Amino acid sequence: KLSFIYGDIMNLPFDSAIFNNAFAIQVIHHVSNKEKFLKETYRVLKKGSYFGIQSCSHEQLQAFWFCHYFPKGYIVLLF
């Protein structure tokens, strides 16, 4: 079963030590307080868990297809 939970990355809506692993894919460059983000992620992980972070540079971000179609940024009004 898959479910989506809306929450604040700086104050995750989960108990401590509940997850086996976590991933942050294309997220960390959007986070203003990286130390708080990492501490909060550590809080919800069980001892011995893995935390994977994948990110890229601003130059690499420009190579993504959506930058060609939306050169002014990532926020697009769909209504």
Image (spheres, helix red, strand yellow):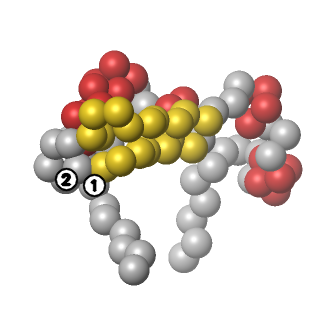
Disc ID at residue 13: 2
| Residue 46: x %, y % from top left | 27, 40
| Residue 78: x %, y % from top left | 58, 72
Which quadrant holds the N terminus? bottom left
Q: Residue at x 57, y 65 (%)?
A: 77
Outermost bottom residue: 1
| Residue 10 in view of the camera | no
Would you place residue 25 above or below residue 2 in this image? above
Q: Residue at x 79, y 27 (%)?
A: 59
Outermost left residue: 15
| Residue 42: x %, y % from top left | 29, 31
Precedes in sequence: disc 2 or disc 1: 1
Q: Residue at x 23, y 50 (%)?
A: 18
Nearest the viewer among 30 and 11 is: 11
* Residue 35 figure quarter: top left
Nearest the viewer among 70 and 37 is: 37
Residue position marked by numbered label 1 in the rendering:
7
